Amino acid sequence: MSTAYAQKNGFFAGLWDYLTTVDHKKIAILYLIAGGFFFLVGGIEAMLIRIQLIQPDNEFVSAGLYNQLLTMHGTTMIFLAAMPLIFTLMNIAVPLQIGARDVAFPFLNSLGFWLFFFGGVLLNCSWFMGGAPDAGWTAYAPLSTTSPGHGVDFYVMGLQISGAGTLIGGINFLVTIINMRAPGMTYMRMPLFTWSSLVTSVLILFAFPALTVGLFLMMFDRLFGANFFDPSMGGNHVIWEHLFWIFGHPEVYILVLPLFGLFSDIISTFSKKRLFGYSAMVFATVLIGFLGFMVWAHHMFTTGLGPVANSIFAIATMAIAVPTGIKIFNWLFTMWGGSIRMTVPMLWTVAFIPSFTLGGFGGVMLAAAAADYQYHDTYFVVAHFHYVIVGGVVFGLFAGLTYWWPKMFGTMLNEKMGKLAFWPFFFGFHLTFFIQHFLGLMGMPRRYWKFQPDQGLEIGNLVSTLGAFLMAIGTIIFLINVVITTIKGEKVSGDPWDARTLEWSIPSPPPFYNFTQTPLVRGLDALWVEKRHGNGKMTPAEPLGDIHMPNNSFIPFMMSLGLFIAGFGFIYQVDNSSYLILAVLGMAITLLSMFVRSVKDDLGYHIHKEDLEKGAGSE
Amino acid sequence: MSAEELKQLKPGQSPHEPEKATLEGKNKFLGFWFFLGGETVLFASLFGTYLALKDSNLDGKPAEELFGLELVFIMTMILLTSSLTSVYAIYHMKNLDFQKMQLWMGITVLLGLSFLGLEIFEFYEYVHHDGHTFTSSAFGSAFYTLVGFHGAHVAFGLLWIVTLMVRNARRGLNLYNAPKYYVASLYWHFIDVVWVFIFTVVYLMGKVG
Ligand code: HEM
Ligand SMILES: [Cu+2]
């Protein structure tokens, strides 16, 4: 199989390559394209929401459409934009940071992507097939179970499929980080991004199945006549709230923890200092992950669980502020006395710290259960979670993409334009959301289509919408930067940031087998150790030898496609049972693909030592 | 590595733990344990839902009238035994004795099949004699979802093990398929453990009220 890694050219060869790839770096790019696309879709939905709310009694969109936009904005941003973009970062960085040639299960990596992708496409098909889901991203029953049409069915099936992909991704990164570390890469030498990816993966593993069950129950209720959430048949809709938030609260930490890790790496790199309190950072990350499972009912203070439950969950929730505070201070102390370079990734990071902290303050206020009766379901909550999610996750994604762009594409985003994108986004963000705290305190409920004139809400909403436009401008400048950078295509070195961790010890972009020889890790910040105490290069941990690589496969695509087709079948069989054929057909495609996967040996191939010496795969 | 992995292993050879002899095998082993962790949360959620809804039988028979313990006791014994036979199979795998492993896996499959048959019979009785259906009440929905999820796991496990047995019948044990057999048996034990909980929480506690 010596030709397996020869370059193939042409558009279709390239397309086929991406449809079948199991290379974590290419899968990262797939996640980037799909996640970036959904980010724009969700962004457009957000702009339409804000335009509707620019003035009282506005008629820009209809009430029904508003509900759909609102639901799809939240659902898209969480599941189809933030999650995949985080997987972009994890895919590009985690294997490289631990000195691995790929993830533990390259095949499953590809499967995870295609499941997410087809789930997302299925969900968005609803727009063209009678209307999108309209019961909020939380889809509370009985609003969701009684919502007419098929919108919520698309929500259920779409999230079920993409959720399966996420779960698979989580398991994959867990095993990768535990089993695939290079010699010397002990746990306490792992970069914080890898650490937080590990903790995030644990959260994914234990949180997503609760959503899976919730979605199944809702599917059974809506599509197969079950009565889980129908009180008149003995059902109980609080079950949905529990299942959703047992998943939902860990989910918000799934979103933000990887970026916490990333910020730690960035701060230490651009302060030219070892991370302050490394072990405290690790400990805080693990603790946040653990506590994240104990607090879900803070979303249900007004459900009526009673004062005892509310108090317990209030205290547990406030406790999370402690490890979060530890992190904030450690970041500040890392910068203190460092020689700081205000690059674009660093700029986003520095902006993140106060922004996120404000979000945390809002969170602790909300955690006071008695006070939450006032805040709940008002714009105060909207302000809180946008402060943490935009100020934490989105800032982090911009920082991370800029930081690892050279590693992914071998070329560097323009720094000037990066800053030009940052400032409008940053100011726009605070304009949009800071004032929403006050709108909420003044009593403006969230998720309402209109607000009334002469209640003092006009200015706040106007400012908020103007801020949203600034954010849009920032995003567009970022995109222009991407286009210009790609066209120019100036090549950069393997280590353009003068950074500290292993991914920067190899060329940008790396050859498809990553490390010609597995590196030997001699301390925290492996590359920096060599820069300080060695010759600036990693010492190999093994002699040059054959490298074993996994085969590409089209099966993940087919498996996911089958579920996609089956999804339509399940949704439409309520109208006409002959649609069940579609369900059967889709499931058959999926099961058959699994069967093929099971009986066909997939042993991978070897790159031979001689070819490596000739430089196979490197550009 | 690759061609090596397909070399047939015979009794008396090394390694003693063929399922973990390759990196792929080790990854599979660990990954599957994590997967079972996720499955645990899945079933825990289903159990929680069932416990919340088990008394919502409306006009239908309540649990203590509906359930009979004889049949489920037999089913429990069958499934427990099948767990034991799969242990034998893995024991023989560790001795690299492929034929005996296949034999015990085969017995496991037969036991699993009879369990599934009895379960289908049980459901049939509920539906046709007791009017206890998926849609008759929240209790019905929760019952069939929990027990049915387990049943579907059994069915999937059977398909999986049979596929493995047929696929490898001629070529015997090697480092490539040993981890596959091993995780299939792990899965089978997991199904068994879940059933023990179902037996306790659904049937025994249902009888006691
Ligand atoms: C110090 C840490 C935090 C505390 C104490 C906290 C507390 C809370 C509380 C009590 C609520 C419920 C408010 C209500 O509905 O009345 C809430 C909502 C929310 N929080 Fe946080 N939070 C914290 C951090 C975060 C982080 C890090 C994220 C995400 C990255 C986040 C995302 C959300 C979201 C999305 C909601 C609203 C969900 C919805 O109803 O749609 N929070 N938070
Ligand atoms: Cu929460």
Image (cartoon, grey):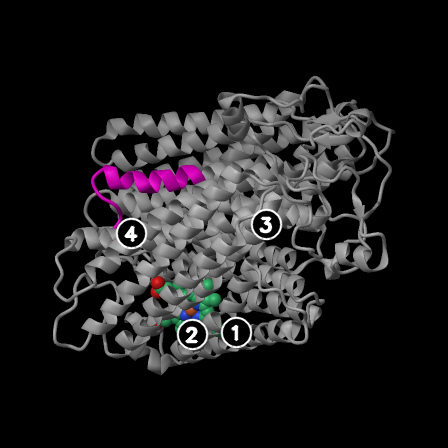
Q: Residue at x 78, y 29 (%)?
A: A612
Closer to the observer: label 1 or label 3?
3
The crowd level at tag 1 (other Cα within 10 Å; few <14, some 14-19, many 20+) is many
Q: Which residue is mark 2?
A: A363
Q: Is residue A435 in the magenta section?
A: no
Picture layout, residue A5 above or below residue A518:
above
Q: Which residue is mark 1?
A: A320
Q: Is residue A127 in the magenta section?
A: yes
| Chain to which mark 4 belongs | A
| Chain to which mark 3 belongs | A
How far apart marks 2 and 1 lie (CA) works out to: 10 Å
Q: Which residue is mark 4?
A: A45
Q: Residue at x 45, y 65 (%)?
A: A391
The answer to whether residue B53 is visible is no
Dot label at residue A404 = 3
The crowd level at tag 2 (other Cα within 10 Å; few <14, some 14-19, many 20+) is many
Of mark 4 and mark 3, the one earlier in the sequence is 4
Closer to the camera in the image, A129 or B111: A129
Magenta segment range? Answer: A116-134
Quadrant field for ligand 1: bottom left
Of mark 1 and mark 4, the one earlier in the sequence is 4
